Image (cartoon, coloured by chain):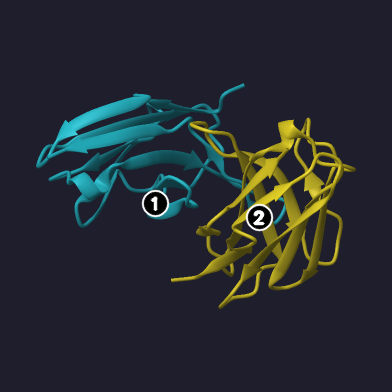
């Protein structure tokens, strides 16, 4: 059962445009929603994360929008740059058994064209 | 930010041999670490949770005897792929949560190629 569904699978955006990646989850026990950026051959790096008690969080050019009732959250990358070209993963977790276990979405390969 | 390292970054081995991968938290202690496997162009799949001072917890479908995990100290977890076969070739990544926060920091990954 896929607990976190991510779309689109791939995305092409022109430089300066807005990149939007969407995720939906099923488990209402999830209470932490991070986004990770991964470059080829590297480990994922945390971009930004949100908890369900807020509807939006912004850090620089990156914004998470969260809709608790719809069980959806999205990542917006403003003024997209070629250096943003990478694979982006959403994830979700809940605290259980003494730790948070992350469940990842399938990933979105973003290409920002100059 | 917190740093997690992995060693080696890349390893090539012959079929039937065992390979050990180390995961270290460099500036914080981690009682729990996680091991993931990632196939090309796919997502990260959690293999197991490494617990300092106790046995690892494996995800469904992961062979415990094939993927041996030892959490030797508060800063070191090791994953040993025993009797490796070509189908074990993959990108192995560890992560560790810092303190009592939700944030997990990932290592740079280890590319395993089994010939």
Image position of A105 (left or right of A64): right
Residue in the image at 11% along x and 37% along y: A17
- In the picture of the structure, the residue carrying the numbered disc 1 is A49
Residue in the image at 38% along x and 40% along y: A88
Q: CA distance from mark 1 to mark 2?
A: 17 Å
Q: Chain of mark 2?
A: A
Q: Is residue A70 above or below residue B33?
A: above
Q: Nearer the viewer, residue B72 or A102?
A: B72
Chain A on-screen colour: cyan
Q: Nearer the viewer, residue A68 or A41?
A: A41
Q: Are marks 1 and 2 in contact (CB under 8 Å)?
A: no
Image position of A42 (left or right of B86): left
Q: Would you call the spot at circle 2 few (<14 residues within 10 Å), some (14-19), or many (20 or more)?
A: some
Query: Quarter holding the C terminus of chain B?
Result: top right
Q: Chain of mark 1?
A: A
The location of residue B51, given as percent across then percent down, is 77, 60
> For residue A106, which numbered disc appears in the image?
none
Which residue is most to the left?
A16
Q: Nearer the viewer, residue B83 or B37?
A: B83
The location of residue B107, given as percent across then percent down, is 55, 59
Q: Helix, strand, or loop for circle 1?
A: strand
> For residue A99, which numbered disc appears in the image?
2
Q: Helix, strand, or loop for circle 2?
A: strand
Image position of B66 (left or right of A7): right
Q: Is residue B90 above or below residue A70?
A: below
Residue in the image at 65% along x and 41% along y: B46
Q: Quadrant of residue A112?
A: top left
Q: Which chain is yellow?
A: B
Q: Would you call the spot at circle 1 few (<14 residues within 10 Å), some (14-19), or many (20 or more)?
A: many
Across the whole image, how many numbered discs are drawn on residues?
Answer: 2
């Amino acid at each position: 059962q896929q607990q976190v569904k991510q779309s689109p699978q791939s995305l092409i955006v022109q430089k300066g445009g807005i990149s939007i990646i969407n995720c939906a989850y099923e488990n209402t026990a999830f209470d932490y929603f991070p986004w990770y950026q991964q470059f080829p051959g590297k480990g994922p790096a945390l971009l930004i994360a949100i908890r369900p008690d807020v509807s939006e969080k912004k850090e620089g050019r990156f914004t998470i929008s969260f809709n608790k009732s719809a069980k959806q959250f999205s990542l917006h990358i403003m003024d997209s740059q070629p250096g943003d070209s990478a694979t982006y993963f959403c994830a979700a977790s809940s605290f259980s058994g003494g730790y948070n276990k992350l469940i990842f979405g399938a990933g979105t390969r973003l290409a920002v064209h100059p | 930010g917190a740093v997690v390292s992995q060693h080696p970054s890349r390893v090539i081995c012959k079929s039937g041999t065992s390979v050990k991968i180390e995961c270290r938290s460099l500036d914080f202690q981690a009682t729990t670490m996680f091991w993931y496997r990632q196939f090309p162009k796919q997502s990260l799949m959690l293999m197991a949770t490494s617990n300092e001072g106790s046995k690892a917890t494996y995800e469904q479908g992961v062979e415990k005897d094939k993927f041996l995990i030892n959490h030797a100290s508060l800063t070191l977890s090791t994953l040993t792929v025993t009797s490796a076969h070509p189908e074990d070739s993959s990108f192995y990544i560890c992560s560790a949560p810092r303190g009592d926060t939700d944030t997990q920091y990932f290592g740079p990954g280890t590319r395993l190629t089994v010939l």
